[in-house]
Image: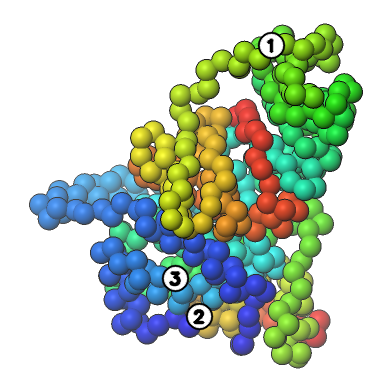
Amino acid sequence: MAGSGRDERAWVRRAQAGSASDFEALFRAHWGPAYRAAYLVVRDAAAAEDIAQEGFLAAVRALDRFDRRRPFGPWLHRIVVNRAIDWARARALRPEGEQVDSPAPERPERDEQLFRELAGLSPEHRAVIVLRYLLDYTPGEIAELLELPRGTVNSRLRRGLDSLKERL
Amino acid sequence: MRFRAPHEHEAEERAWQVVGAAYAEREPVAWPRRHVRPLAAAALVAAVAAAALSPPGRSVVHSLREAVGVQKAEPALFSLPTPGQLLVTSRKGAWLVHRDGSKRLLGRYRDATFSPHGLFIAATRANQLVALDPKGNVRWTLARPAPRFPSWTGTRTDTRITYLSAGRLRIVAGDGTGDHPVEAGGRGASGADTATIRRHGGQSEVVARGRVVFRGTGVFDQALWSPNHRWLLVTWPTADQWVFVRPGTPRRIVGASRISVQFGGFPRVQDWCCGR
C-alpha cells in the first residue's frame, strides 16, 4: 500500500536528490493501485502493465519538476487512468478479438460477477467507478483528476452503478 | 475493495526493470539559485502569453499538464513512437508491425526484409525465397535449398535481393528473375551510426553516438535505429520488453511489455523501415 503522506513526501524529495532506494520505495508503494486501476479499465493485463509502466516513466521524466507539497498518488493515477481510458476507447474502435485475461484466482467468489459486469461498462464509466471504489477518491478529486465537471462525475457514477445493479 | 489484478507481482518486477533503469539514467536538473528569479519571471511571461493565445475553453489544468511535460496518451500503448514499420520473426513466423501497434502474421517464415521503399517483403522458408506484399500475399517464389538472410537493396526501379543458399551468396532481381550465384564481396559500408550492446557482470548497456544511452539488468539482444535515426529499439528478453529510447535532451523512454505473449515467443527484429 502507499505510504503515509510524510513517507511519500520524503521519498519524493530523496528521489529527486538521486536516491534510487527511495524512488524504488515510491514505485513499490504505488505500482499495485496504478496497475489494478489500469487493469480494471482496460481488462487486459499486458495493456495495463504498459499503461502503469508508462505512468511511472512519465513520473521519472517529470520528477525534477514535481511539486513535493502535492501528493504523488493522484498525479500518477491521473496519467494512468486517462491513458487507460484512451486505450480502451481505441480498442473499442479497433476490435482485434484480443483475449481478455481471466480474473485472478485469489479473488473472492462473490466479486467475480461484479468485475465481469464492470467490464461491460464504457471506459468512462469504468474509470470513475474504479477511482471511487478501488482507489477511494472523492467525486471532487475524481473531477480534478479527469478534468471533468463534478456533475459529470456524479452522473457517471450514478449511471455506472445503476447499470451494474441492473446487470447483477 | 480487495482486489489483485492478474500477474501483478510479475508485472511489477518487469516494470521495475525498465522504470528503475530509466531513473538510473536520468539527468537530474540542478538549477543554480541565481537562475530562479529570472526563470520565474520568464515562466510568468510565458504563462500569460500562453493564456492569451489559448483557444477559448482550453483548461488551465490541461495547459499545466503540457507545461510539465506529461505527454498526451497514445491511442494504443503498444504503438511505435516514430514513423515506420517493423518486421519481426518469432516461433510463429514473420510479423509486420504497423506504427499504430496493429500487427499481421505474414506466415511461417524464418527471415524477412523490406524492399528499399517498404512496398514489398522478401522472406525465407525451408526451401523457398518468397516475395510478399504487406498483406502477406505471395508475389513470387524461388525454390532454393535453405535460403537465409535476404537483403533487398536498390532503387525504386531496380532492386535486387541477395541471400545465402547452401553456403553460397546469390542474387536475384526484385521481380524474381535472373537468379545467380555471386562472389562474396560484401554489401558495402555499414551505417556509421550504429548502436552497440556491451555486457559486463549481470548488466547490459547500449552505446550510441559515443555514450551510454540505456542500461539495465540482464541481457539485451538487439539495438536498432529507427528509419529516421531518432529512436533506438532495444530488445530485452530478460525483462520481456521492447524499450524505445530517444537519446538526446530530453531523453525519452517508451516500453512495451510482455512481448513474448504478443508474438508467441520473444521475437527477433529483422527490419525497421520507411517513415509512414
Which residue: 76% across, 84% down? A112
Q: Do the dots labelled 1 and 2 sit on one chain?
A: no
Q: Which residue is mark 2?
A: A137
Observer-side mark, 1 or 3, equals 1
Colouring mode (rainbow / by chain / secondary structure / one colour): rainbow
Quadrant the C terminus of chain A occupies: bottom right
Observer-side mark, 1 or 2, equals 1
Q: Nearer the viewer, residue B241 or A93?
A: B241
Which residue: 65% across, 40% down? B269
Q: Do the dots labelled 1 and 3 sit on one chain?
A: no
- x and y, in percent, of residue A90 in the image: 68, 53
SS for callout 2 = loop
At label 1, the amino acid type is Glu
Q: Is residue B11 found left or right of B206 in the rendered image?
A: right
Q: Which residue is mark 1?
A: B183
At label 3, the amino acid type is Phe
Q: Nearer the viewer, residue A154 or B5?
A: B5
- x and y, in percent, of residue A88 in the image: 68, 60
Q: Chain of mark 3?
A: A
- Answer few, some or many: residues within 10 Å of disc 1's Cα (few below 14, many 20 plus, some between 14 and 19): few
Q: Chain of mark 1?
A: B
Q: Nearer the viewer, residue A20 or A37?
A: A20
SS for callout 3 = helix
At label 2, the amino acid type is Tyr
- Distance from disc 1 to disc 2, alpha carbons, whole Å, reads 70 Å
- Distance from disc 2 to disc 3, alpha carbons, whole Å, reads 20 Å
Which residue: 73% across, 87% down? A111
Q: Which residue is mark 3?
A: A27
Q: Which of marks 3 and 2 precedes in the sequence?
A: 3
